[in-house]
Structure formats: structure tokens, C-alpha cells
Amino acid sequence: MTDKLRNNMHRETILFLLVAVIMGNSLMTAALNQTIITTDESGLNNPEPTEHSSLPEKPVLQPKETVPVTGNYVLNDTAGKPCIKVSMGVVYKVIDKKKASYFNLDPSTTLATGRCGQKEAVLSLAIVGEGGYLDLTFEKEGNISYVSKVRANLAPSKGNKNYPGVIEHEKLFPTAADHSLKCKSQTEFHLAENLRVKLGPLQFQAFKLTNGKFGEEVECWADFNKRIFPIIIGTTVVGLLLIAVLTFLIIWNSRRQAGYDRI
């Protein structure tokens, strides 16, 4: 075999190997691309986002007090008849390190439960997500019903603190049967050293409701005092002015009479 023939065979072999390498790379690239496309389409590399059930957020304390939203709550007995009906706004006031923070009860995230009895009924307002609660216990004596116990707890989102408190053995908001108590003013209850609860504006009725509606309204003492106080002040001022005028007239008349006597 001549040198020229061997050189030609050598070049052909090299060209064949180069072509084989190039074709092999092309096939591998195509295969890899096909694999990547298939993986993407199957969703293994880019899984679709799954929906997670969002848990209710715990109460977030605010540095300033605002007007609460009025919630309407009805508790039915086993026969399906209302035994408690309440319309009110609720503000929690937490005192920590001599600093006050506030939380307004949101009716849309509040669950109303409780129990109805002939002489005692309890309305329990629970904040979803174990954020706290507010319990109002109503008692009935003869023809009068009243709130005997207010119990509350608040578990804010910041920190792991709970703020419980209670007042009991009370006779708050006494109201005659078939009547509802209405109070435009806020009433603040000191349930614990670091927890206050403000209720208002409010209207409620317990034990007996006709057709599930509020009965004749009874004004609370706070509203009565707020309404009557300006009248008392005005009457007192007018009385003092009359006394001053009468005193002046008496003194003036006495001096004039003394002048006549000297003449």
C-alpha cells in the first residue's frame, strides 16, 4: 500500500470519526431537550402552587382606640326561639408595662354560642383562631333580669401572653321583663389589672323576646346622667343668678330705706 493511499484512508477515518462525534452530540442534545420539555410539561420541575387553608389571624393590638363595629348576636334555645339578643360594639383594652393597647371585636370573625336556661343564660362570643372570648351571663329574678358576670380573655398575635379577667356576683343593667336596655354611652369594665373591656353602644334583651325583636327600650344610667347633667348644671346656674339678684335687691332696698330714715 502506497503512502498516498494510506494518507487518504487516514483522512477518511478522521472525517468519519468527526462526523460520528458531531452526530452523537446532536442526538444527545435533542434527547436532553426532549427530556427537559417532557419534564416541564409533566409539572415535575414547575409544580402548580397548591392552595393552603389560611388560618385566622390572632388579634393585633393597636396603639390608639377607635370606634368599634357594632355586631348583632342572637342565641336561640333548643326550640329555636331567641333567648338572648345583643347589639353592641366591644373594645378590649390591654395594659402592659403601663402602656395601653386596644383591639376591637370584629363581628365577621366572631362566633356566638352559649346556653339558655329559665333563670340563667350565657352568651359566649369567641374570636376565631383561639384569639379570645367574651362571656356575658344573664340572670333572672322575678320580673327583673340583669348581667351577673362578665368574663373575657384576649390572646394577641404578638408574644405568647394571654390576658384573662372576670367580674362576677354583680347586678349590672337591671331591666324589666319584655324590655330591652339601650345605652349609647360606652361602659368600661375592669376585669383584671391589665385587662379592660368596653361595651357600647349596646342594646340587649334576655329570656323573653316577642317575635325575636327588642321590646320597649329602657335608658341606661350612663345615658340618663349624661342627659340630665347639663339640665342640673343649667338649673343650678339659674338658681345662683336668682339668689344673687334677690340679694342685691334686698341690700339695695335696705340702703335706700336707711337713707329715708336719716332724712
Image (spheres, rainbow, N blue to C red):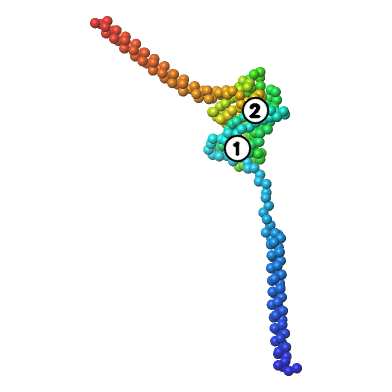
Q: Which mark is residue 106?
A: 1
Q: Quadrant of residue 4?
A: bottom right
Type of amino acid at the residue the image marks with label 2: Gly
Q: Earlier in the sequence, mark 2 or mark 1?
A: 1
Q: Which mark is residue 150?
A: none
In the rendering, at what x and y percent does residue 206 appear? 64, 25
Quadrant of the image containing the C terminus: top left
Q: Quadrant of residue 169?
A: top right
Residue 170 visible in the current orientation = no
Type of amino acid at the residue the image marks with label 1: Asp
Q: Secondary structure at mark 2?
A: loop
Classify 255 as above or below 140.
above
Q: Please rate how many residues cluster around mark 2, counting C-alpha atoms within 10 Å: few if below 14, some from 14 to 19, many from 20.
A: some
Quadrant of the image containing the N terminus: bottom right
Q: Which mark is residue 212?
A: 2
Q: Please rate how many residues cluster around mark 1, counting C-alpha atoms within 10 Å: few if below 14, some from 14 to 19, many from 20.
A: some
In the rendering, at what x and y percent does residue 47 appear? 68, 57
Question: Which residue is at a point 70% across and 71% down the rendered structure image?
Answer: 30
